[in-house]
Image (cartoon, rainbow, N blue to C red):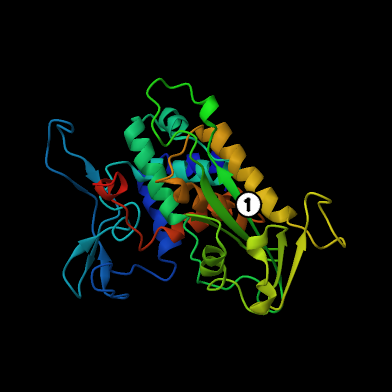
Amino acid sequence: MNLAELSAVVSDEAKAFELVERLRWPNGPVCPHCGATSRAGRLPAQRTKPSKKHPEGKSVYGLWKCYACRRQFTVRVGSIFEDSPIPLSKWLLAIHLMCSSKKGISSNQIKRELGVSYQTAWFLTHRIRLAMTVDPLKSLLGQDGGIVEIDETFVGGKVVNNMHHDKTKAAGRKTIVMTLVDRQGDALGVVVPDTSKETLEAVAKPIVDRSATIMTDGNPIYANLDDYFRGHHAVDHDKRFVRAMIIHTNFAESYHSLLKRGLIGAFHHVSAEHLHRYVNEFSFRWNSRKESDGERTERAIRSGAGRRLTYRPLIGR
């Protein structure tokens, strides 16, 4: 569904819960406490105790009880939605906005669109990025003799462009993102500490099938990759961009272009501490590029199960 159709559904919080339940539990509710699959019953909607913020109490939707472990739960438990005071309807709108924005959407815009504070929007978007995390070991890149492109890019501004009077030593320090793109499949971006040959091999060998053919540029760190993989071809960008029609890194460079346009145009500044989360977001959208915005949104909702991110670890406390 598109954003207009989703807005019509989530205008009712109860319907928002039904939508997430249908996506997360296609075969019926599963107790997140004990794992029972057939011994849960739905409870009627209840209200919380009155408080200063909610004098009449607050409605609790989608409540279930497991008759195996005797505990109550909702579809929020055991997912990125757990313990969040934000209505599930706003969560779904935020997920759709992030999934449909090709170059990303900033927390400030999420704040304006949903009517929440900036801190709430920032925490919300990082929890959604956790659901978008690509599992690098789920399936190897370049299986059955495929072609995998490997390239690296540097993220960060120049010292001369930093006009802050209190700029730190980090000003001008660039972060390295190494990208591996299967021409017939998925892409994976990895934040790496350096561009040494040892780092390259530590990243590539566990996630690229040995039968794959590797395409890189002329960087010497990529030399001798054919000792491990089926083959290795390089193109010298000082002389040409494409060699023999198929020897190029255009897919990896396209990924870098989308990543940098998002970082510069939507986010403006991303700290090295959280860069890997944004890279995961762009990898998720790249890997689902053939799906519609609605299908991509449903994929993100399903991927949120079993993943939890709390605020203190996120800010390094």
Q: Is residue 167 left or right of 179 when viewed as pictured?
A: left
Residue 203 seen anywhere in this rendered image of the structure: yes
Q: Nearer the viewer, residue 47 or 226?
A: 226
Q: Quadrant of residue 78?
A: bottom left
Residue kind at label 1, given as amino acid type: Ser
Q: Mark 1 packing: few (<14 Cα in 10 Å), some, or many (20+)?
A: some
Residue ID at (23%, 68%): 33
Please tell me whether residue 272 is drawn above or below residue 52 in the rendered image.
below
Q: What secondary structure is marked by label 1?
A: loop
Residue ID at (26%, 56%): 63
Q: Nearer the viewer, residue 257 or 155?
A: 155
Tell me where residue 157 appears, x and y as whole percent. Answer: 54, 34
Q: Quadrant of residue 51?
A: top left
Tell me where residue 252 appears, x and y as whole percent. Answer: 67, 54
Residue 288 seen anywhere in this rendered image of the structure: no
Q: Which residue, given by chain and number where applicable, does mark 1 sit on?
A: 292
